[in-house]
Image: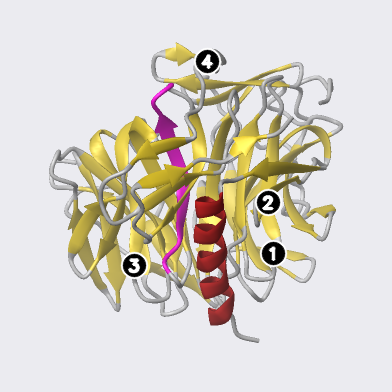
C-alpha cells in the first residue's frame, strides 16, 4: 500500500534538488494475539527496535494488535485535535522537513545515498508499521503475518531490514525488497530475532535468541549472509548494531561493552572512563560511533572511535548526556544531546550534527525535542522531531536555508 503526500512548490523543489544531489553520488491490522512462541510466553511490550521487554517502561505496549507508545510519564495517546501548520519559521542552517501525517506517530531510522528513507509509524488506529519513503510517497512494508513491523535500516539498493511479528506471535528479523518481506530466521534453536543494520553486500546484523529454552534476554549478535546466520560469539547478551562493506560489525555485549567484530576477531573499543559503552554505527572507513559513561559512570557522552582512539564528542550547550547513532563516509556524526536524554529513550533532547570538532543543534519542527538517527554521504539526515502540537513525526533535515519550512500533509 502506498500513501501519497502533497507538498508545496518550494518544498518539492527543495527535496528534488537534494535527492538529485544524492543520486549523483551513487556509484555503480491485524488481530493476532500478542503471544510469542517460546518460554517467555506472552510478549506485551517491545522497545523501539522490536526487542521484547520484561517490563513496560518504554517503547510500545501491544494489545490485540494495537500499539501504544510508552513514555517515562506513562502510556500516551496521540493528540488528534491540534492542526499541523503548513509552514513554520526555522532559524539556522538546517531545514527540517516533516515526513509524517497529522494524528500519527512516526520515526525515520535511516537514509541511503539515493535519498530513500526507512522508518516506522503508528497510525490513528494504533497499527505499528514499517515504511519506505521516497519522492513524497510512503510505502507500507507490511508484516510477516502478525500485528506489527519496524524498519530500522536500509542500504543503497533500497533493501530494508527490521523486526516483525509472525502470525504465531513470535518476532523475527526481516529483509524487505521490492514488495517482498522475508523472514531471516534465527540462530540454531532460537525463537526470536531482530535486524538492526544492512550493508550494500546484503549482509545483515542484529540479535537472535540462541536456544529453544532461552528467555528473550538471552540473545547473541549475528551476521546474516546469503541465507546463513552466524553467531558472532561476543557474549551471552549481545546485539549487532552496524555493519559496513568490509563485513565489520559493531554493537554491544555484556562481556565486552562496545565491540568491533572483524572476521572472528573481537576488539573491545573501551569507554570514556566509565564502565559502560555501546557502539551504534560504523562507516566504510572503519570509524565507529556510540556512547559511553564518563568517570563515575554518569553522565554518558557520544563518541567517535577511529584507529584505536575514542574521542568524546561532548554535548550541546545545555549539557546533560549525548548519544551518537550514525556516521557517514566523510565522518559526520548525528545523534541526540540534552539534559533529559537517556540511552533507551531519547526523551528530552535535540538532534545534533557533529563535524570538524563542533556539535550543531539541528532544530525541530516547532516543538522542544528532536533526534537524528541516520545520515547519508551527501549529508541528508533523518530522525524524528516534535511539533508545536506535541505530536512526534519522522523528519528529514537538509542543509538548505529557507525562510519557511514546508511540511508534508497526509492525504487520507
Q: Position of residue 237 (x, y in %)?
A: 51, 46
Q: Where is residue 261 in the image (x, y as percent from the top left)?
A: 48, 69
Q: Position of residue 316 (x, y in %)?
A: 18, 47
Real-space Cα distance between discs 3 and 1? 22 Å
Marks 3/1 in contact by CB < 8 Å: the verdict is no
Instruction: Give the mark nearer the N terminus: 3 vs 2.
Output: 2
Real-space Cα distance between discs 2 and 4? 24 Å
Instruction: Give the mark nearer the N terminus: 4 vs 1.
Output: 4
Residue annotated with mark 1: 158
Q: Is residue 383 a member of the stretch shown in magenta?
A: yes
* Residue in the image at 52% along x and 52% along y: 11
Tell me the crowding category of disc 3: few under 14, some 14 to 19, or many 20 or more residues within 10 angstroms, Cα based: some
Marks 2/1 in contact by CB < 8 Å: the verdict is yes
Marks 3/2 in contact by CB < 8 Å: the verdict is no
Q: Is residue 21 a member of the stretch shown in magenta?
A: no
Real-space Cα distance between discs 3 and 2? 24 Å
Instruction: Give the mark nearer the N terminus: 2 vs 4.
Output: 4
Residue annotated with mark 2: 132
In the foreground, 328 or 2: 2
Is 104 placed above or below 98 here?
A: above
Residue annotated with mark 4: 79
Residue annotated with mark 3: 332
* Residue in the image at 39% along x and 25% along y: 388
Q: Is residue 375 left or right of residue 302?
A: right
Secondary element type, mark 2: strand
Amino acid at each position: 500500500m502506498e500513501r501519497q503526500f502533497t507538498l508545496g512548490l518550494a518544498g518539492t523543489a527543495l527535496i528534488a534538488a537534494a535527492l538529485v544531489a544524492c543520486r549523483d553520488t551513487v556509484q555503480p491490522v491485524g488481530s493476532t494475539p500478542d503471544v510469542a512462541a517460546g518460554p517467555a510466553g506472552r510478549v506485551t511490550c517491545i522497545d523501539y527496535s522490536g526487542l521484547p521487554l520484561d517490563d513496560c517502561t518504554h517503547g510500545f505496549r501491544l494489545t490485540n494488535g494495537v500499539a501504544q507508545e510508552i513514555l517515562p510519564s506513562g502510556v500516551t495517546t496521540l493528540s488528534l485535535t491540534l492542526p499541523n501548520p503548513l509552514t513554520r519559521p526555522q532559524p539556522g542552517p538546517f531545514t527540517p522537513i516533516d515526513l509524517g501525517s497529522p494524528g500519527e506517530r512516526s520515526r525515520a531510522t535511516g537514509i541511503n545515498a539515493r535519498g530513500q528513507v526507512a522508518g516506522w509509524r503508528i497510525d490513528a488506529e494504533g497499527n505499528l508499521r514499517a515504511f519506505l519513503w521516497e519522492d513524497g510517497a510512503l510505502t507500507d512494508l507490511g508484516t510477516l503475518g502478525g500485528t506489527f513491523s519496524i524498519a530500522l535500516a536500509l542500504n543503497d539498493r533500497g533493501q530494508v531490514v527490521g523486526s516483525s511479528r509472525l502470525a504465531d506471535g513470535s518476532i523475527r528479523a526481516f529483509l524487505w525488497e521490492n514488495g517482498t518481506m522475508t523472514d531471516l530466521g534465527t540462530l540454531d534453536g532460537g525463537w526470536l530475532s531482530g535486524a538492526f543494520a544492512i550493508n550494500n553486500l546484503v549482509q545483515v546484523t542484529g540479535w537472535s535468541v540462541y536456544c529453544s529454552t532461552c528467555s528473550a534476554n538471552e540473545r547473541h549478535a549475528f551476521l546474516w549472509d546469503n541465507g546463513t546466520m552466524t553467531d558472532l560469539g561476543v557474549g551471552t547478551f549481545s546485539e549487532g548494531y552496524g555493519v559496513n562493506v568490509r563485513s565489520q560489525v559493531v554493537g554491544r555485549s555484556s562481556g565486552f561493552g562496545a565491540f568491533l567484530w572483524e572476521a572472528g576477531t573481537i576488539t573491545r573499543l573501551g569507554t570514556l572512563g566509565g564502565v559502560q559503552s555501546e557502539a551504534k554505527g560504523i562507516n566504510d572507513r572503519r570509524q565507529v560511533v556510540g556512547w559511553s559513561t564518563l568517570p563515575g559512570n554518569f553522565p554518558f557522552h557520544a563518541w567517535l572511535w577511529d584507529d584505536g582512539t575514542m574521542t568524546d564528542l561532548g554535548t550541546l550547550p545545555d549539557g546533560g548526556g549525548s548519544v551518537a547513532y550514525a556516521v557517514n563516509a566523510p565522518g559526520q556524526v548525528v545523534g541526540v544531546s540534552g539534559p533529559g536524554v537517556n540511552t533507551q529513550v531519547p526523551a528530552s533532547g535535540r538532534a545534533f550534527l557533529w563535524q570538524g570538532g563542533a556539535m550543531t543543534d539541528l532544530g525541530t519542527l516547532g516543538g522542544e525535542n528532536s533526534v537524528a538517527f541516520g545520515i547519508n554521504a551527501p549529508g541528508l539526515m533523518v530522525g524524528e522531531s516534535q511539533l508545536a502540537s506535541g505530536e512526534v513525526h519522522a523528519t528529514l533535515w537538509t542543509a538548505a536555508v529557507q525562510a519557511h519550512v514546508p511540511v508534508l500533509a497526509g492525504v487520507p
